[in-house]
């Protein structure tokens, strides 16, 4: 409650970097009357506003079609806490972890991403990519699909979204493995593999799903060797970042039939150019980086920031703090 704020909050300034801040800014102002809020709704106006306002706190969204202003944000000497309204911190790396606290919005869309994964997994087993290709050709042809019964899902990454996907996958009867930095067991999956054993896990699963953050460790993680390690006839899903996948190797694995199908919600270049060969790859479904964006996600991300702002004011540990050297 506002009445609980310490007097030190009176001089704090927060900047919202977003062109739709009016969706939630009035509620922030009402909840935190001691904070001086400003909004930057134009990408090109950010440098001037940073110099003029000198905010201690920034809540930053991405602007569609514009590069993330990493250099400008990190150059703001007054900035002490940068709250990213999305999960991926690759756009900010590296930063001085001793000077700047960084949090993200990981977990806001975890349940919705799990539903996307659910649709993608079952769609691949049902043969939806091939069925769609036949529909485009107006070809009515009987189709016998593969059953997902007794199938094994392999998660690369076991963060908020990975755990939500694991829970949903197990609820429909799938066995779930995960690969991450540590091999410490998790109650939410049937087995955990350390990152050094990624290829071993890939050889034992029917679906490999990439949901790890983009870091130096995960960039180009899936190339020819990783796809070759996967079981013949298995499926691949990328819900993380396009730069983790060598797309030419993926296309080759689909063309040869080594992979039976794939779903990509992310690509190395976004938007994906019309001339990109991914569009013509067989048994591949592409969605426009939409698995985490649903009606109401903006308000949910702002609510997560508000809860953290309350923690910041009262000197309590922040949720979702991230570090530039994190793994997966």
Image (tube, rainbow, N blue to C red):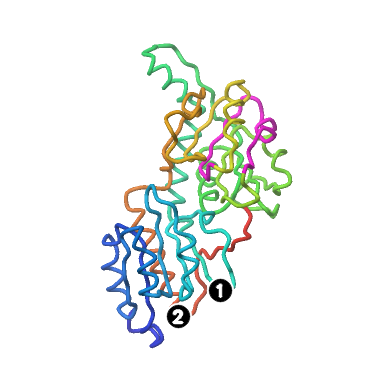
List x then y, in percent, for residue 325. Answer: 63, 60
Q: How far apart are marks 1 and 2 (CA)?
A: 19 Å
Residue at point 29% right, 63% down?
24
Q: In this view, does 214 lie to the left or right of 305?
A: right
Q: Is mark 1 on a helix, strand or loop?
A: loop
Q: Name the residue under label 1.
A: 99
Residue at point 47% right, 21% down?
130
Q: In this view, does 112 lie to the left or right of 26?
A: right
Tag 1: Cα neighbours inside 10 Å, few (<14), some, or many (≥20)?
A: few
Is 53 located above or below residue 237 in the figure?
Answer: below
Q: Quadrant of residue 61?
A: bottom left
Q: Determine contact: label 1, label 2, CB under 8 Å.
A: no
List x then y, in percent, for residue 206. Answer: 61, 32
Q: Nearer the viewer, mark 1 or mark 2?
A: 1
Q: Nearer the viewer, residue 74 or 280?
A: 74
List x then y, in percent, for residue 43. Answer: 35, 58
Q: Does the magenta stretch include residue 53?
A: no
Q: Nearer the viewer, residue 268 or 212?
A: 268
Q: What stretch is highlighted in magenta?
A: 220-242
Q: Is residue 302 left or right of residue 229?
A: left
Q: Mark 2 points at which residue?
A: 314
Q: Which of 147 and 6 is in front in this view?
A: 6
Q: Is residue 226 magenta?
A: yes
Residue at point 70% right, 33% down?
229
Q: What element carries label 2?
A: loop
Give the mark nearest the N terminus, 1 or 2: 1
Is 10 located above or below residue 279 in the figure?
Answer: below
Look at the image and tell me in which quarter the N terminus lies.
bottom left
Is 278 located above or below residue 176 in the figure?
Answer: above
């Amino acid at each position: 409650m506002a009445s609980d704020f310490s007097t030190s909050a009176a001089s704090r300034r927060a900047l919202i970097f977003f062109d739709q801040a009016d969706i939630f800014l009035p509620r922030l102002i009402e909840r935190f009357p001691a904070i001086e809020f400003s909004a930057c709704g134009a990408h090109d106006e950010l440098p001037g506003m940073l110099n003029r306002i000198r905010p201690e706190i920034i809540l930053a969204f991405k602007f569609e079609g514009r590069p993330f202003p990493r250099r400008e944000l990190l150059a703001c000497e007054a900035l002490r806490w940068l709250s990213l309204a999305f999960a991926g911190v690759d756009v900010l790396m590296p930063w001085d972890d001793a000077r700047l606290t960084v949090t993200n919005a990981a977990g806001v869309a975890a349940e919705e991403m799990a539903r996307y994964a659910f649709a993608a997994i079952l769609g691949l087993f049902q043969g939806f990519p091939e069925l769609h290709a036949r529909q485009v050709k107006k070809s009515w042809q009987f189709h016998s699909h593969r059953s997902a019964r007794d199938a094994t899902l392999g998660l690369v990454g076991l963060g908020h979204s990975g755990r939500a996907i694991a829970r949903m996958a197990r609820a429909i009867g799938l066995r779930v493995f995960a690969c991450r930095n540590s091999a410490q067991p998790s109650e939410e999956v049937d087995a955990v593999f350390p990152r050094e054993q990624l290829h071993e896990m890939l050889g034992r699963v029917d679906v490999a799903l990439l949901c790890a953050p983009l870091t130096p460790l995960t960039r180009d993680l899936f190339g020819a060797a990783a796809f070759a390690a996967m079981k013949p006839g298995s499926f691949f899903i990328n819900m993380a970042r396009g730069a983790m996948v060598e797309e030419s190797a993926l296309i080759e694995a689909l063309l040869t039939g080594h992979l039976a199908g794939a779903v990509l919600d992310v690509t190395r270049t976004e938007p994906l150019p019309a001339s990109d060969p991914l569009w013509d790859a067989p048994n591949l479904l592409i969605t426009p980086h939409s698995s985490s964006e649903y009606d109401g996600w903006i308000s949910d991300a702002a609510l997560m920031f508000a809860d953290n702002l309350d923690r910041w004011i009262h000197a309590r540990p922040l949720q979702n703090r991230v570090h530039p050297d994190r793994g997966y």
